[in-house]
Structure formats: structure tokens, C-alpha cells
Amino acid sequence: MTARITAPRPALTAVLVRLGVLLAGLAAILAQPQLHTVPTAVMLIGVVLAAAFPARIGATVAIAGFVLAWTTAYGWHVTPSAPRTVFAAAALYALHATSSLAGFLPLDARVDVGVLRRYALRCVPVVIGAAVIIGVNYAIPRFAGSALVELAGLVGVLAVLGIASWLLLRSRSTSEPENRTNR
């Protein structure tokens, strides 16, 4: 008698998440200003790897290919349009977020669609925030040299550092066990 081993069937939600990785990767490929052969091939290989083996290095390879394509197309001294930059940032974020979700989601996991919807909705504020930051970044050179803009930039940097420090200290205090001695 031989025992027959059967692999679990992939769940629809896990397949949909991996399809989301492929769609986000396709959007990142289309966000490139020009389709050069080598960067596009590197991105395509990375996207396929990210969809097939999401817990591995595929998304990193795809993003590195995108950076190579973006730098090849624009160089260091040309400023791309704001809508193209927002679209590229959103596509790369979607690729990264869906790859990370697929990396933690086993192929046979059955997940409620509401969970995936909430996960997707949590990504919306990040994309909107990136669009605002990109828009401000394009508007600031018009006001270069203004004392008010420089003061706002300094306050912004200090706020980011303060929030990051607060979050770091908060995470350390909640993760460390309390040292109590019973007497």
C-alpha cells in the first residue's frame, strides 16, 4: 500500500492577493517613463518572483528594477511630472503592500474578504499622504529662500523625528516585561 500525499488546494483569497501582486507590478511597469529592456526585464522577473514566492526577495528585485528604469529615463537633473510620480509611488506602494500580505498569507488560508477590504482601505491614506508630499515637493521650489518655508521645513523635520522617537520609546515600553519582584 502506498500513501498518497495531496497538496492542499489554494484558497481563492490567497490567489486573489497574489493576483494583486501581479497587477501592482504591472502598474509599476507601466509607470516607467520609457520601457528600456534591462530594467523592464528585471522588474518583470521581480514581479513574477514576488507573486510566486512572496516571502522572498521578488518585490525588492522589482523595486530595484523600477529605480533603475526611473534613473535611466530621467537621470539626476530632470524632474518628472507630478502625476507620473504619484502614480509610480502608488504602484510601488501597492506592490510592496500586496507582496507583504501575500508573504504572510499561506496559499491554503481562507480569509474573509472583509479582512482584505480593510487591509486595502488602510493603504489609501498612505497613497493620499504620498500625493500631498509629492505636490508640496513640487511647489516648494517656487518659494525657495522664503524664511517661512525654511522654518516650516525645520518644524516638519523636528516633528517627524519627535514622532519617530515617541513611537520607538512607546514600542519598547510595551514590549518589555515589567520587572517586579514579589516580596
Image: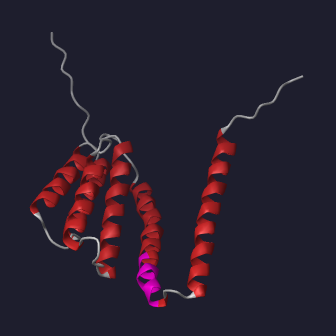
When the figure is inspected, residue 149 is found, relative to residue 118, above or below; the finding is below
- Asked if one can make out residue 22 in the rendered structure from this viewpoint, the answer is no
Quarter of the image where the C terminus is located: top right
Q: Quadrant of residue 71?
A: bottom left
Magenta residue check for 45: no
Give the answer, above or below, for where 108 lies relative to 114.
Answer: above
Q: How was this image coloured? A: secondary structure
Instruction: Specify the farthest residue to the left.
Output: 37
Q: Could you tell me which quadrant the N terminus lies in?
A: top left
Residue at 49% of width from left, 89% of height from top?
Answer: 143
For image coordinates 31% across by 53% down, the residue present is 17
Compared across the picture, whether 37 is left or right of 47 comes to left
Viewer-proximal residue among 153 and 63: 153
Q: Main secondary structure of the magenta part?
A: helix
Residue 3 percent coordinates (x, y): 19, 16
Report the number of numbered marks: 0
Task: Name the residue at 45% across, 61% down.
Answer: 118
- The magenta stretch is 134-142
Looking at this view, is 49 or 34 the one in front? 34
